[in-house]
Image (cartoon, rainbow, N blue to C red):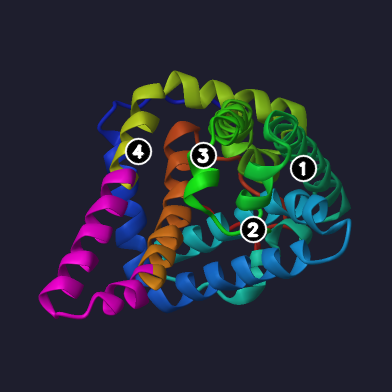
Amino acid sequence: MKLKLVPARTGAVWVKLGMQTFFKQPLALAGLFFIFMALMSVVTMLPIVGLPLAMTLLPAATLGLMAATREATQGKFPMPLILFTAFRAGPAKVRAMLALGAMYAAGFLLAMGASYLVDGGGFARLYLGGSAPTAELLQSPDFQMAMWVFIGLHLPLSLMFWHAPALVFWHDLPPLKSMFFSIVACFRNFWAFTWFGFAWMGAIVVTILAISTLGTLAGNPALSGMMLFPALMLLASMFFTSLYFTYRDCFEPETPPGPDQTQLNPPA
């Protein structure tokens, strides 16, 4: 495996490829994303163990969406079973993926716990959907400090796990090594990922403005509210579709799969 360096403009290309690939298989990729969201939501609702379990499964679920994107680039129709790709490649990779997930869950809970200590759990409850936002809460200095503490801890955690599931599954790296190479790849391609983030933020802003304008022109502000949530969910699906391209362009192609993995991992 070899890390590749890409120019800054590649970040915008990743966004473009994510959108183009999504529209090649919109029903499949949108459906898989909503199944992914539903599974995470159901697991999170389990008492006590729900949130840690959901965070443990998140890297494996993300890999499933990347595998679906990979199939879509090959002109195939990804089926729902592809979401469980990480659990269909033998016990060694299952253990590695669960270990990776356990480390992500620990990091996420640590970041959330740190924010809890700052404001007594106001940000944590809002982030996890346990409370509704209020103007008083959002303007609270403690809430804002807790938000920045969480962001400051969660951002490096996200970079460590950005490529890690793909590196564990397609390159047979151990979890810790995959995390190291993941964050190195993100920093070495800093400007590409910066443009990637700005491009997605721009897409979100344009979508919100377009829907708000449409509702105003139609004389029906409620129409904007009805359209905004599904539009943002479709954008989120396109975002997850674009993740595969960030991995593909940052690393040399994986080694050819063994006989037991040929059906799971066709050559890119």
- Give the residue type that dot 3 points to: Pro
- Percent position of residue 143, x then y: 58, 36
- The answer to whether one can see residue 47 in this image is yes
Disc 3 packing (10 Å; few <14; some 14–19; many ≥20): some
Q: Which residue is mark 4?
A: 196
Q: Secondary structure at mark 4?
A: helix
- Give the residue type that dot 1 points to: Ala
Q: Residue at x 77, y 66 (%)?
A: 45
Q: Secondary structure at mark 2?
A: loop
Q: Are marks 4 and 3 in contact (CB under 8 Å)?
A: no
Write down the quadrant of residue 217 in the picture. Answer: bottom left
Cα gap from disc 3 to disc 1, whole angstroms: 28 Å
Q: Which residues are magenta?
A: 201-228
Ranked by sequence position, the earlier of labels 4 and 1 is 1
Q: Are marks 3 and 1 in contact (CB under 8 Å)?
A: no
Magenta-span inclusion, residue 211:
yes
Of the pair 108 and 35, the residue shown nearer to us: 108
Classify 47 as above or below 56: below
Ranked by sequence position, the earlier of labels 3 and 1 is 1
Cα gap from disc 2 to disc 3, whole angstroms: 44 Å
Write down the quadrant of residue 154 in the picture. Answer: top right
Mark 2 or 3: in front is 2
Cα gap from disc 4 to disc 1, whole angstroms: 25 Å
Q: Which residue is mark 3?
A: 253
Of the pair 233 and 134, the residue shown nearer to us: 134
In the picture, the disc for residue 166 is none
Disc 2 packing (10 Å; few <14; some 14–19; many ≥20): few
Q: Is residue 162 left or right of residue 186?
A: right
In the picture, the disc for residue 105 is 1
Q: Residue at x 39, y 63 (%)?
A: 232
In the picture, the disc for residue 131 is 2
Q: Residue at x 27, y 59 (%)?
A: 208
